[in-house]
Image: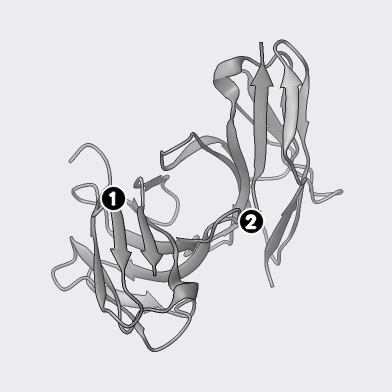
Amino acid sequence: GDSVTQMEGPVTLSEEAFLTINCTYTATGYPSLFWYVQYPGEGLQLLLKATKADDKGSNKGFEATYRKETTSFHLEKGSVQVSDSAVYFCALTSNTGNQFYFGTGTSLTVIP
Amino acid sequence: GAGVSQSPRYKVAKRGQDVALRCDPISGHVSLFWYQQALGQGPEFLTYFQNEAQLDKSGLPSDRFFAERPEGSVSTLKIQRTQQEDSAVYLCASSLGVSAGYTFGSGTRLTVV
């Protein structure tokens, strides 16, 4: 069945460091891929998405490219800020979009 | 409303009690989903509605879990005879349709003692 595997945390970085959170997926057909962010005490917020191979999603300095050949959707940011501290979830939906499959989440802490 | 609203925000139940969790989706959103998020885990699908029709309930973990959306708007997730393993955050999400974006609520944190 469809599934997502993402890099385990927690991840601790200094401010302005480069961030990569790895995500790979298993899916039949052509899924859409997402990164969601969850700040402490809040719900999931869509960070970025890509709906077909080679698409790049980007938002707030974060980027991820839909790589079909490696079944990956790694999240990157060139210079993290303290305010980026949160839990990041990689997710996919099938063609029908009837449900999300989430990874287990990666906790990021950025220290000044 | 402007976002997906869930209530209560926190619920403590004694083992064996029944609970009801409410979700108010964004007005006009056809699709509604319930997810369960255990501590330190990603959300897991429970059930999906399109309007008032429950099209997929494959993720409900047992027959103690029941969801309804009688008028195609507000939805209620009911858990009967709660057990400790039911402790989790229950998330609701709504969407205009398959190809549209999903908006999640802040969730209800259920603790069964």
- The picture places residue A28, in percent across and down from the top left corner, at 70, 67
Q: Nearer the viewer, residue B23 or B69?
A: B23
| Mark 1 and mark 2: Cα distance apart in space | 32 Å
- The picture places residue B39, in percent across and down from the top left corner, at 55, 56
The amino acid type of the residue labelled 1 equals Arg
Q: Nearer the viewer, residue A9 or B14?
A: B14
Question: Residue at label 2?
Answer: A31
Local packing at callout 2 (Cα closer than 10 Å; few below 14, some 14-19, many 20+) is many
The amino acid type of the residue labelled 2 equals Pro
- The picture places residue A46, in percent across and down from the top left corner, at 49, 38
Q: Residue furthest left?
A: B71
The mark found on residue B9 in the picture is 1
Question: Which residue shows up at 26% across the image and 40% down it?
Answer: B3
The mark found on residue A58 in the picture is none
Name the quadrant containing residue A1: bottom right
Q: Secondary structure at mark 2?
A: loop
Question: Which residue shows up at 36% across the image and 78% down it?
Answer: B15
Is residue A60 in view? no
Name the quadrant containing residue B48: bottom left
Q: Is residue A104 left or right of residue B76?
A: right
Residue B106 higher or lower than A12, as above or below = below
Q: Nearer the viewer, residue A98 or A19?
A: A19
Residue B66 higher or lower than A107, as above or below = below
The quadrant of the rendering that contains the C terminus of chain B is bottom left
